[in-house]
Image (cartoon, rainbow, N blue to C red):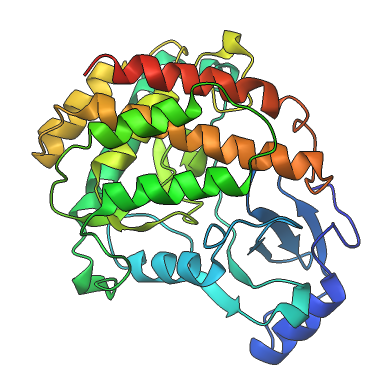
Amino acid sequence: MSSDDNPPGLDLTRLRDHLDRERPGLVAGELRAALVEGGRSNLTYRVTDGTSQWVVRRPPLGHVLATAHDMAREHRVITALAPTPVPVPGTLLLCEDPEVLGAPFYVMEFMAGTPYRSEAQLREIGPEATRQAVLNLVDTLVDLHAVDPAAVGLGDFGRPEGFLDRQLRRWGKQLDASRSRELPGIDELHAALGRALPTSPAATVVHGDYRLDNVLMDGTTLTAVLDWEMSTLGDPLADLGLLVMYSDQRAGDGLPTPTTGGAPGHPSSAEIVRRYAERSGRDVSAVDWYTAFAYFKLAVILEGIHYRWTLGQTLGPGFDRIGEVVPVFVDRGLRTLDRL
């Protein structure tokens, strides 16, 4: 593990003092930490005392969109899902006092496993393992959507009524908060989604960013679902549309997003939708709307990251090209919506 005395956004002395106060005896030695690369939103650090390992999550530095980086919500949903079939890390501590690290944060168990982000990674495990890993990803999504929110204390985790309309308005506001240039087609996509709004099925816990590189795999076994920052109660098909959208991305496109769909053995989008439908019993006939909405949402997220990059408020490599690809997702969203 490459480490840093104090990675940006993480003061290890303050963290150690807080852990010693709140969880005496947890930390046995001097802390070292490293920023986990790959995330483009909340910051994730791997922390060790030389014996044990933990993960610390906090919001990004600088420009933060309202409600987009709520540590307490993320901590709450992971804690609530612990007794369910959905594999999640154990939570150790939530700190909502910004005086400690400059922002709220939480600490969770370190989970072993690999987040598959590229075709190249999946080629190493072969087509049969790739196929099984992706099908397990779909089955875990079905398991998540089968959880009774009230039974795990999440009955008030969101307002499911009018979920899709509210999501469209919310992401429209997120776009407005990050506008720094002209983006042809994005307002057209937003308006077209509003005109074609489908009727939602019964609400479930929704992950909000469900894809292969937001879970950990040990071989073909899914060991943990991560990155719950956008979770809520809402329309489960929003998660399916997002998974379909990511499955359609290819390595040759040069995009700063997971590109696993072209790996040998990777199930097609149609098979992913079919397996979800068969296992969940839900009507998936409007999946193109949800996929187009996923393109819109990703375009807005990437535009927000591009905006933070223009302000010099991003950490790690790979941010300089994100602005270039936002129009690609706008165009794909419009073309997907045309299939309805």
Q: Quadrant of the C terminus?
A: top left
Residue 113: x percent and y percent? 54, 43
* Residue at position x 71%, y 47% in the image: 36
In percent of width and height, residue 312 lies at 84, 45
- Residue at 62 percent of width and 36 percent of height: 303
Q: Is residue 252 visible?
A: yes
Instruction: Classify residue 276 as left or right of residue 303.
Output: left
Residue located 74% across and 45% down the image: 308
Task: Indicate the position of residue 30 as horizontal and vertical percent values.
Answer: 85, 72
Instruction: Name above or below for residue 23 compared with residue 128.
Output: below
Say whether residue 189 is left or right of residue 51. Answer: left
Residue positioned most to the right: 5
Left/right placement of residue 113 relative to residue 271 reads right
Between residue 36 and residue 217, name the one nearer to us: 36
**Residue 66 in which image quadrant:** bottom right
Location of residue 202 with respect to 240 vertically, above or below: below
**136 vs 270, nearest the viewer:** 270
Which residue: 84% across, 57% down? Answer: 8
Question: Is any atom of residue 135 visible in this view?
Answer: no
Tally of marks: 0
Answer left or right for 234 relative to 103. Answer: left
